[in-house]
Each structure stands twice: as structure tokens, then as C-alpha cells.
Image (spheres, grey):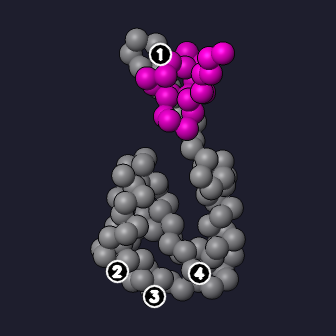
Amino acid sequence: MARRIYNLKTWKYVRLSKLSASPWCEYCGAPASQVDHITPVESGGHPFDMDNLQCLCQTCHSRKSAAEDGGYGNRRKVKGCRPDGTPLDPRHEWNREKKNLPARDRKTVRRK
């Protein structure tokens, strides 16, 4: 769901407004080209709140994302468990049933 907001007109307007208000990277002072959510939308951060946004250069934004997410495109490990004690992470070895795994994590079973 969070990725969908980046195609909205509201996001594009808020992004340009934030870059206009503070055109310099808040980490290193270089010209900013990226707008980053301080509290990720997936973690409950409001997607359009100016106080939840910071302007960063490409290098600092990539560095921050890699530190938080493990790199671009890598999903974070889900920590914790359900009330019955089963892990929340669908990729955990206890949840290795085909019905619980995303398509890209399923192993193809070949019959001979």
C-alpha cells in the first residue's frame, strides 16, 4: 500500500513543496533530490505530514534505506509472533507451507 502513494498527485505536490522549503540534504548539506519519510508509512508514519518528511541527497537516502531495509528491494524481517506462538514472518522456517509464502519464495517442486 505504501508504494501506491508515490503515484498520487498529493504526494507529488507535497514532495515538491518539501524540496522547495528545504533544498539541502539534512544529513550532509548537499543539494537534495529525494524526500524521505522519517517514520516509514508501513510503520504508521503519515505519508503527507511535512513533519514526517526530510530532504536528502541520493547518496544519503540510499545509505539510510540500506541501513533500515537491508538494501533496495529487500524486505525487512518481520519480528515477533502471533498469540499462538507462530512467527509473523511468512519466510520463517515454521511457516514454510506453500499457502503462507509469497510466490517468489515458493520452491518449485519437480516430479521425476
Alpha carbons under labels 2 and 4: distance apart: 16 Å
Mark 4: which secondary structure?
loop
Residue 77 screen position, x and y as percent: 58, 36
User: Residue 86 — which label?
Assistant: 1
Alpha carbons under labels 4 and 1: distance apart: 43 Å
Q: Which residue is mark 2?
A: 13
For badge 3, the amino acid type reads Ser
Residue 105 screen position, x and y as percent: 57, 33
Of pointers 4 and 3, the one earlier in the residue sequence = 3
Q: Given contact means CB atoms under 8 Å apart, are the residues at marks 2 and 1 in contact?
A: no
The quarter holding residue 41 reads: bottom left
For badge 4, the amino acid type reads Ala
Mark 1: which secondary structure?
loop
Residue 97 lies in the magenta-colored region: yes
Residue 55 lies in the magenta-colored region: no
State whether residue 34 is above or below residue 77: below
For badge 2, the amino acid type reads Tyr
Of pointers 2 and 4, the one earlier in the residue sequence = 2
Q: Which residue is mark 3?
A: 20
Q: How many marks?
A: 4
Relative placement, left or right, of 39 versus 104 is left
Alpha carbons under labels 2 and 1: distance apart: 42 Å
Q: Which residue is mark 4?
A: 32
